[in-house]
Image (spheres, helix red, strand yellow):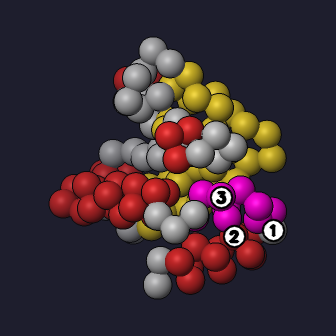
Amino acid sequence: TREKSFPTGLDMEFLGKDLPNVAIPHTDIVHNLAEKVVVVRLEKPVTFHNMIAPDKEVEVSLLFFIINNSSSSQTNILAQLMDFFTGNGHLEDLSKISEPEALYAYIAEATA
């Protein structure tokens, strides 16, 4: 699978011990018709391989699926996600939100 070849899990412990780990799954641009990021908060963590250290596993509870139809914007989307993860306590805030509508509203406001 693509995840084995290109791991997408990120260990966020460097930002704080109790913060959720994230994964940024994505597919080849030829399979996408739009440019979006779809956020999923899992009830139970799922194991991903670490993007930085592929031999290590990461328990992930937040997924940020990149749906992108332009190769030129892929790096920009990844950079924006990393800025979001590392800025202003966003991961801590997201870890406390359980309702999908509230999650969407928080992300929409934080990225406006």
**CA neighbours of label 1 inside 10 A, class few (<14), some (14 to 19), many (20+):** few
Q: Residue furthest top?
A: 55
Q: Which mark is residue 99?
A: 1
- Foreground disc of the pair 3, 1: 3
Q: Residues within 10 Å of mark 3 (few under 14, many from 20)?
A: some
Does the segment drawn in magenta span residue 97?
Answer: yes
In this image, 64 relative to 98: left or right? left
In the picture of the structure, the residue carrying the numbered disc 2 is: 103
Q: Which residue is mark 3?
A: 92
Q: Disc 3 versus disc 1: distance between alpha carbons? A: 15 Å
Tag 3: amino acid: Glu
> Does residue 44 appear left or right of residue 76 in this picture?
right
- Residue plotted at (33% across, 45% down): 28
Q: Position of residue 81 (x, y in %)?
A: 42, 59
In percent of width and height, residue 50 lies at: 47, 28
Examine the structure image and report whether residue 66 is included in the region drawn in magenta.
no
Q: Which region of the structure is painted magenta?
A: 90-98
Identify the main secondary structure in magenta. helix
